[in-house]
Amino acid sequence: MWKFFIQQFVLGGISASICLLIIPLYLYAEKPITPQQCTMSAEEINRLIAEENIPQSQLQLGKEYLSGICVEKNEAKGVELLRKVAEQGLPEGQMALGSLYFNGQGMTQDKEEGFKWYQKAAQQGLKEAQYDLGGFYLNGWGIKKNEYLAIEWYEKAASQGMTKAQMDLGNIYWYGISVQANREKAIQWFRKAAESNDGIAMSSLADVLLDGKGSNVERKEAVDLYLKAAQQGLAGVQFKLGRLYEQGRDVQRDYEKAYMWYTISEKWYHDFEDRKRNLASLLSDAQKIETENKAKEFLKLHPTQVVP
């Protein structure tokens, strides 16, 4: 689609300003450009846009020079462009330059300098930079370790709806990482993460709710969360459901359901065969066939791909 706008610009059908406004929407969409989709014309367009002093475009071109995906790889040019947009104050550029310093890509590694650029981006409210800055403080990368500042920056990112930050805060409070363990705060942050329909977040919340301290309402909620997460293809959650129904823990014991969930997750768990064999002796042939058919139907709709 972006080629159409270039053609219209060349033919005089649209102005340069409109062309420069529309093209980035196609070039820098969320789906990354693959090498197969890149041509010289894409390189020329990116360079043209970069020359018009559009920071977001310069940022993208700098990344392309560093990766060599859409243009011939040139780390020096990539660093030059990222430094330019970072110094102009673009937070995404500051974070990108910080990453180069942190990893030593195209320059000598300097974690302290990397921290400074991440900090600049984080102070402008870029949630990804805020999250990473939390990691700097938590691990002592380029700065003195400070768990309280780490949590502060994680909370800033989490308050902007960043699921990863919410999950990390949940784990920090649940396991008592550098702070006193706090079940309620762990539930609070895991619940926020689960609201994004993230399967791993739902599973983590369910784990906490089933810690033996929860109410009947919490235990029922936990099973519901496991069921939702299982539909996202999380084999670990599917296996947990099998154990719950086999042991009758927090749910009514149901060997058919246990057999079904073990069948669904069997590709990922080597100890499945022993469990399935034990359950098979408790089920009739008709029950086993029906349960295996249900497992097949479930896998058609929800392929198991991830082991959390």
Image (spheres, grey):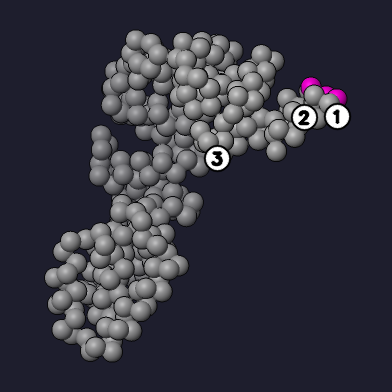
Nearer-N-terminus badge (3/2): 2
For disc 2, the neighbor class at 10 Å (few under 14, some 14 to 19, many from 20) is few
Q: Is residue 300 magenta?
A: no
Q: Secondary structure at mark 1?
A: loop
User: CA–CA distance between discs 2 and 1?
Assistant: 8 Å
Residue 32: give its label: none
CA–CA distance between discs 3 and 1? 28 Å
230 over 88 or under it: above or below: below
In which quadrant will I find the N terminus?
Answer: top right
Q: Tell me residue 262's x, y (percent).
A: 26, 70
Label 3, on which residue? 31
Q: Is residue 144 above or below residue 129?
A: above
Query: Gap in Å between the C-alphas at discs 3 and 2?
Result: 23 Å
Name the residue rendered at 59%, 19% in the picture. 58
Residue 196, image x, y percentages: 49, 51
What type is the residue that disc 2 sits on? Gln
- 30, above or below 72, in the image: below
Query: Is the residue marked by circle 3 packed among few (<14), some (14-19), or many (20+) residues within 10 Å?
Result: few
Q: In the image, 273: left or right of 301?
A: left
Tell which circle, 2 or 1, labels the residue nearer the N-terminal end.
Answer: 2
Residue 149 position, x and y percent, is 36, 26
| Disc 2 + disc 1, Cβ < 8 Å | yes
Q: Is the stretch drawn in magenta largely helix, strand or loop?
A: loop
Q: Left or right: 96 with respect to 146?
A: right
* Foreground of the two, 23 or 119: 23
Residue at disc 2, secondary structure: helix
Q: Quadrant of residue 245?
A: bottom left
Q: Which residue is mark 2?
A: 7
Quarter-of-image position of residue 259: bottom left
Q: Which residues are magenta?
A: 12-16
